[in-house]
């Protein structure tokens, strides 16, 4: 079993959080570059779909006129 201090969430913890949201709510993640990170607690934001964006800008951008999604935002490290 992994060290809890290394990871922000376990599968069980994430399942409990996700059960609080509608089953048909879209989920998006932050990204760019390589490797993997822990993520912050999921939260709801409104986004618009911009398929013409270059890959490094992402397919979605925050916009109050958009559709609600559940966002998994990767942890930001300053090292």
Image: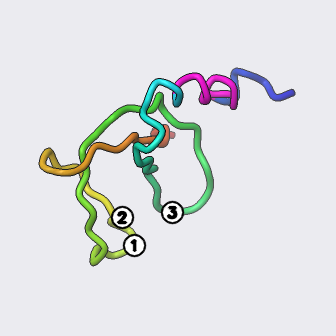
Q: Are marks 2 and 1 in contact (CB under 8 Å)?
A: yes
Do the numbered discs 3 and 1 sit on residues whose CB atoms are within 8 Å? no
Q: Residue at x 35, y 44 (%)?
A: 69
- Disc 2 marks which residue? 58
User: Of tags 2 and 3, which is closer to the observer?
Assistant: 2
The numbered disc on residue 33 is: 3
Question: Quick check: 14 above or below 35?
Answer: above
Seen at 46% across and 24% down, the residue is 20
User: Are there few (<14), some (14-19), or many (20+) residues within 10 Å of tag 3?
Assistant: few
**Quarter of the view holding residue 8:** top right
Q: Is residue 35 shown to the viewer in this render?
A: yes
Image position of 6 (left or right of 67)? right
Task: Please say if 28 is above or below 22.
Answer: below
Local crowd at mark 1 within 10 Å, few (<14), some, or many (≥20)?
few
Span of residues in magenta: 8-17
Q: Residue at x 58, y 22 (%)?
A: 16
Q: Could one spot residue 77 in this view of the protein?
A: no
Front-most of residues 77 and 38 = 38
| On-image quarter of the N terminus | top right
């Amino acid at each position: 079993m992994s060290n809890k201090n290394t990871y922000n969430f376990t599968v069980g913890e994430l399942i409990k959080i996700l059960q609080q949201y509608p089953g048909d709510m879209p989920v998006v993640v932050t990204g760019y570059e390589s490797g993997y990170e822990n993520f912050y607690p999921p939260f709801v934001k409104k986004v618009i779909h911009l398929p013409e964006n270059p890959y490094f800008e992402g397919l979605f951008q925050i916009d109050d006129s958009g559709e609600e999604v559940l966002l998994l935002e990767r942890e930001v490290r300053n090292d």
